[in-house]
Image (spheres, rainbow, N blue to C red):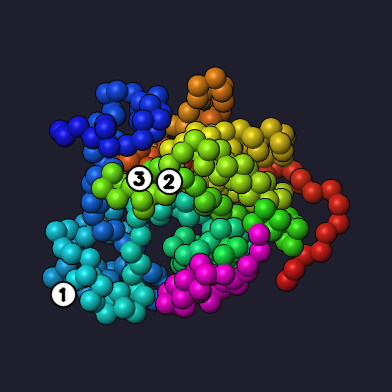
Amino acid sequence: MKNYRDLVPRQFLERLILLFGNKRLDEILEAFVTDRPTTFRVNCIKNSVDTISTTLKNCNIPVDSLSWISGGFKLLNTPLRELQDTEIYKNGEIYVQSLSSMIPALILDPKPDEKILDLTAAPGSKTTQIAALMKNSGQIIANDNSPIRIHKLKANLDMQGVTNTKVTNIAGQIFWQTYPEFFDKTLLDAPCSMEGRYSIKEPEESGEWSIKRIQSLADRQKWLLRSAVSATKSGGTIVYSTCTLSPEENEDVIAWILKKEKGAVVLEDIFISNLPLEDGLTRWKNREFGDEMKKTKRIAPSHDMEGFFIAKLKKIRPTIHCELPVSE
């Protein structure tokens, strides 16, 4: 195995050793140079899994179906462009998406008659997946604070045939003021330092890594999560996810909201059949999170999957105690 230790920032390397230990470090670094296989899911708004499977076979496109997600596939020994040349791709009947990115919507488990918020939605991978799980019924609000990214979001929704979604352009931290305790379920796939998809070959794609950047993002994530909680009904579910490894952006954010909204939100267990997930950290450096944080889940970077973090929160009582207008 090639030594990649000199090709990542020194502080990042030290943190990886703390997270994974020396024994696992080289396999993590190997994942940072791996070209992961193309993975995609069937868009059941436009077609069925069986029909897509038959079409792929007729097009001589070899795939493996995924055991943990219905309609999920991995492309085998075939360039992405061959998949993109098919009519099912051009018509939005399938959606190319990384495996880790498919998990949050499954944990959210949206139902057809529910009101769902995707707080930081662009470019729409998870929004379109949620819409498909809802059978294109119920109501989704897909929000993003970037007008540029919203164009991509709207294009993806249109291509996938999504009609149950309204797009909004509101600062995420104050979104709850427009929709106080309105949603049955909320997804916050938070902007993060993207350590889980770090590329040794193209480090610029991961952004400039620094402790300062992590701390700045963590501060933003906390207030985005508080807004997500405030926008969700009592009895509702909030799923928080990132594609980073940083505990400051993951477990520490969850610990903060549990303290900030003490007694109003609790962690729930996460389980997906046939998909092994690692428990969240119970401590990081001098921070003690406690055994409850094992309910959060981590995915280590691998040859198939990006590094990821997921937490599921249940809101058990209201957190807003004043009257605010609700947008319709």
| Residue 133 appears in view | no
Look at the image and say whether residue 190 sits in the magenta stretch.
no
Q: Residue furthest top?
A: 286
Quadrant of residue 217 within the rendered picture: top right
Q: Quadrant of the N terminus?
A: top left
Query: Label 1 belongs to which residue?
Result: 58
Crowd around label 2: few <14 · some 14–19 · many ≥20 (10 Å): few
In the image, residue 326 sits, relative to residue 271, either above or below, namely below
Query: Label 3 belongs to which residue?
Result: 198
Earlier along the polypeptide chain: callout 2 or callout 1? Answer: 1
Q: Residue at x 56, y 54 (%)?
A: 187
Residue type at tag 3 = Tyr
Q: Residue at x 71, y 56 (%)?
A: 174
State the image coordinates of residue 299 (x, y, percent, origin top left): 38, 40
Looking at the image, residue 125 sits to the left or right of residue 224; the answer is: left
Query: Label 2 belongs to which residue?
Result: 208
Earlier along the polypeptide chain: callout 1 or callout 3? Answer: 1
Mark-to-mark CA distance, 3 and 2? 11 Å
Crowd around label 1: few <14 · some 14–19 · many ≥20 (10 Å): few
Residue type at tag 2 = Glu
Quadrant of residue 16 within the rendered picture: top left
Task: Report the front residue among 50 and 176.
Answer: 176
